[in-house]
Image (cartoon, grey):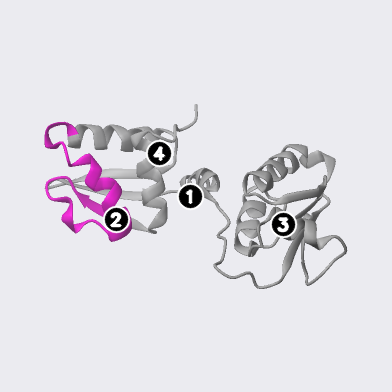
Amino acid sequence: MGLHKNSGSYRLLRSLAIGSGVIAVSLIAPAGVAIAAQEAIAGYFRKKRLARARFLRDLKHLQNRKLVRYRELGGGEVEIAITKQGKEVALRYDIDTVKLKRPSRWDGKWRLIIFDIPSDKKQAREAFRKKLSELGVYPLQKSVFLTPYPCEKEIEFIATIFEIRQYILLLYVSAFEGEEKFRHRFNL
């Protein structure tokens, strides 16, 4: 069973993944929480009566899935450590939030994304294609996509998550035949 994006467990895992290492959370006064996790954990304490029980329930859910390790230290504190598997799950969920940023001024370079992903990685190939389309990258062919926007970090992230980075090539092109059509398409 997966985590639901709107669940407390998902929000907690995602916030913990932003930080790193082990954190100690005071269930009495959460102000001492590491800044990266502070916002997520603060949500648990807005409703004081049920906050501690809900927080511990979500932690237990994440621990049962081997995404975090936690233990109550006494004095109202809990020590939380995100596992390697937890970081991977958080990254997979973060892929849903990846977006290309449109710069205020185009740098004049087209990004051509070319890939030849083997058939034994068909699901990853289809997921990569779908994600490129969601990002607004234009498909020239089944394995060739075009965008005028910087996308290097996003492509690197997506390809790494799908474990297909070695099959992808990113080219920078300054001009090509028929480029006017694409300038219009991207409102450049």
**Residue 76 location (% of width, % of height):** 14, 45
Answer few, some or many: residues within 10 Å of disc 3's Cα (few below 14, many 20 plus, some between 14 and 19): few
Residue at the (65%, 45%) spot, across then down: 131
Mark found first going from the N terminus, 4 or 1: 4
Q: Which mark is residue 87?
A: 1
> For the residue marked with disc 3, what is the amino acid?
His
Do the residues bearing badges 3 and 4 touch, measured as CB atoms within 8 Å? no
Mark found first going from the N terminus, 3 or 4: 4
109 sits to left or right of 55: right
Q: Secondary structure at mark 4?
A: helix
Residue at the (37%, 50%) spot, across then down: 15
| Relative depth, front residue between 89 and 138 | 138
| Relative depth, front residue between 97 and 73 | 97
Q: Spatial distance from mark 3 to mark 4, Cα to Cα?
A: 40 Å
Q: Spatial distance from mark 3 to mark 2, Cα to Cα?
A: 50 Å
**Residue 48 location (% of width, % of height):** 12, 37
Residue carrying label 2: 23
- The verdict on residue 43 being magenta is yes
Do the residues bearing badges 3 and 2 touch, measured as CB atoms within 8 Å? no
> For the residue marked with disc 1, what is the amino acid?
Lys
User: To which quarter of the image does residue 55 belong?
Assistant: top left
Q: Spatial distance from mark 3 to mark 1, Cα to Cα?
A: 40 Å
User: Where is 180 relative to 185, above or below?
Assistant: below
71 sits to left or right of 131: left
Residue carrying label 4: 10
Magenta range: 24-50
Mark found first going from the N terminus, 2 or 4: 4
Q: Secondary structure at mark 2?
A: strand
Residue at the (38%, 58%) spot, across then down: 19
User: Where is 161 relative to 51, above or below?
Assistant: below
